[in-house]
Image (cartoon, rainbow, N blue to C red):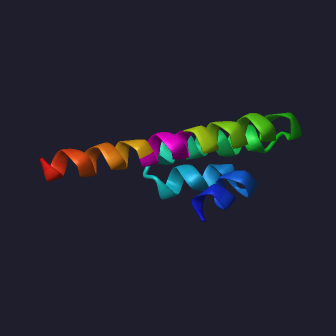
Amino acid sequence: MRLLISLFLPWLTFFTIGRPFAGIICLILQLTLIGWIPATIWAVYALGQYKTDKKIEKALQTL
């Protein structure tokens, strides 16, 4: 679900993963047509990093 959000509303992805400052910057970038593609790429990348961080946290808690 977050992947779809990151494709259509990249700025909202940052708010859902707890990075509101990056979300505001992404929204400003997204307001331009040229900035939409970099904003989407950035949001997908940040979402991937967020998922990786959560997996690492979970693995460390089981130790």
Quarter of the image where the N terminus is located: bottom right
Say which of 24 and 12 sits in front.
12
Image location (x, y in percent) of residue 16: 50, 58
Q: Is residue 24 left or right of residue 21?
A: right
Which residue is depicted at the point 53% across and 46% down? 47
Which residue is depicted at the point 79% across and 41% down? 36
Say which of 48 and 31 sits in front.
48
Is residue 50 magenta-colored? yes
Image location (x, y in percent) of residue 34: 86, 34
Image location (x, y in percent) of residue 43: 62, 43
Could you tell me what secondary structure mostly forms the magenta stretch? helix
Image vertical order of residue 62 relative to residue 45, above or below? below
Q: Is residue 32 left or right of residue 48?
A: right
What span is in magenta? Answer: 46-51
Image vertical order of residue 18 relative to residue 1, above or below? above
Image vertical order of residue 23 relative to residue 15, above or below? above
Place residue 3 in its image quadrant. Answer: bottom right
